[in-house]
Amino acid sequence: MRLRAGLILLLGLLALSGCDHPETATQQQHIQARGELRVGTLYHPLYYFLRNDRQEGLDYELARGFADYLGVDLTMVPAYSLDELFALLDAGQVDMLAAGLADTPVRRQHYRFGPSLYEVAQTLVYRKGEPRPQELTRLNGTLRVLAGSSQAEWLHRMSGELPGLQWEARRDTDAEDLLRQVAEGRTDYTLVEDTLLARTQRYYPNVDAAFSLPSSQPVSWVMDRRDDDSLLAAMLGYFAEQRASGALARLNEKYFGHIQDFDYVDTRTFLRRAEDLLPRYRPLFERHAGNLDWRLLAAVSYQESHWQPEAQSYTGVRGMMMLTEDTARQMGVHDRLDPEQSIRGGAGYLAGLIERLPDSIPDGERVWFALAAYNLGLGHLLDARRITRLRGQDPDAWAAVKENLPLLHQPQWHSKTRYGYARGREAQKFVNNIRQYYQSLLWLYKPTTDNGLATAQAESQPTVSTY
């Protein structure tokens, strides 16, 4: 990868040096000569954020890979609003935008879009307990959307077909804040992408989808309009490689693989216990987490015991981390009902499973494999990887192994394994639940260095449109 990137850069520099008129160099050559790809983005838990001074997010990870593909460094340039974001591109301060932007007719008149990363459905959101809206023309209350958003564009475009609909386009806020306003009863409705709603319901469980608009929209990276196709061509080549290697599927699993199922009652109960019960045990999770995130350890414990020290299952596992007698003995736990011993033992056991996994499993996915092994045993997890390989899929990709875990129930598959029958569907649900609890705890217990996520957004005066 580095050798190829170096050759790309060398060719770009040679092309530039041989030009009598530097202005004729392509956009890709300019970026490579500069040695830096500048990407505009938004602070957002899906696109780009900082955690413990480390950059994360779906668009960040993809942009970092694209910069490597071009053989240059990456500089993310975060904005605080859509207007500011597009102004960066218009002024030439960034080369492209990567911020979950929908490919819409109006935007396409002014900008160029890369290949589709995923699709979103625009969804009308209301507060649980209120009458569920059936259509936009019969809303009984205030509809707020983000100014400059694809939702605002759609409402403008449909003005002739939505007579009488009143809505407000808000500036100096973000879509997640609009969802919070609905949750708190400060506004009645908003329109957001279904992916954002699914993530946000983990901490605002009383917001719900009324319905989605008829057609979905592709989400893509954005460039300015020019005759030069070089950056778009490089982008197409990069994403073709990402799809072929399975890297894009891994990122899709990482950011979207755990948000499909939402249980309102379970989420409300979890958030209440996280407020009332978790503070009592948080010091123990922090003390024994080791290299694990204490919030992940707490999420495992909640899935296992709902943070009840005397929890016991019909299989005989006991305590906050639901350890078997053999595991407790292995981890030096003498009293499984003692919270500190249980947490220490569970943390050590999980860390040991991570270490025992095959080295071929990527670092970013090892914990999900280890959690499945925590639930059904390492041998059965390795059997699921064997089934995945037999089916021609990647045994090192959690998305593929997760799909095949339920096959451990079926004789035609578990008869081909070393350890036989296992409750694979239960393990699949086990890991998915922990990922959702973990996401909620990341939101509830934000590090002070989560710049951009914890920043309060001030409300502005609304721009009112009436049709």
Image (spheres, rainbow, N blue to C red):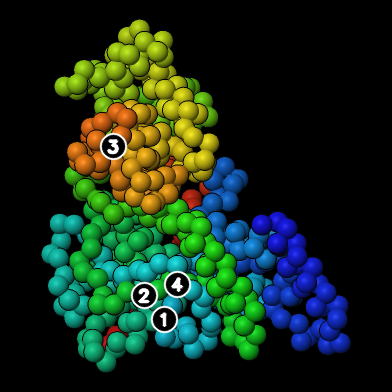
What residue sits 15% from the left and 61% below the top?
Answer: 130
Q: Secondary structure at mark 3?
A: loop
Q: Which residue is mark 3?
A: 416
Dots 2 and 3: beta carbons under 8 Å?
no
Please say if 441 is above or below 292. below
Q: Which disc, if any, is residue 116? A: 4
Q: Which residue is mark 1?
A: 104
Dots 1 and 2: beta carbons under 8 Å?
yes
Q: Secondary structure at mark 4?
A: loop
Tell me the amino acid under the disc marked 1: Thr
Q: Which disc, if any, is residue 315? A: none
Q: Nearer the viewer, residue 67 or 145?
A: 67
Q: Which disc, if any, is residue 217? A: 2
Please say if 9 is above or below 396. below
Tell me the amino acid under the disc marked 4: Ser
Kindly indicate the quadrant of the structure image that contains residue 323.
top left
Viewer-nearest of discs 3 and 1: 3
Please say if 110 is above or below 334. below
Residue 116 spot, x, y in % from top left = 45, 72
From the viewer's perspective, tell me whether residue 92 is left or right of residue 382: right
Label 4 CA crowd tier, 10 Å (few <14, some 14–19, many 20+) = some
Q: Secondary structure at mark 2?
A: strand
What residue sits 48% from the left and 85% below the top?
Answer: 108
Marks 4 and 2 sit apart, C-alpha to C-alpha, by: 9 Å
Nearer-N-terminus badge (2/3): 2
Q: Nearer the viewer, residue 283 or 47?
A: 47
Viewer-nearest of discs 1 and 4: 4
Nearer-N-terminus badge (3/1): 1
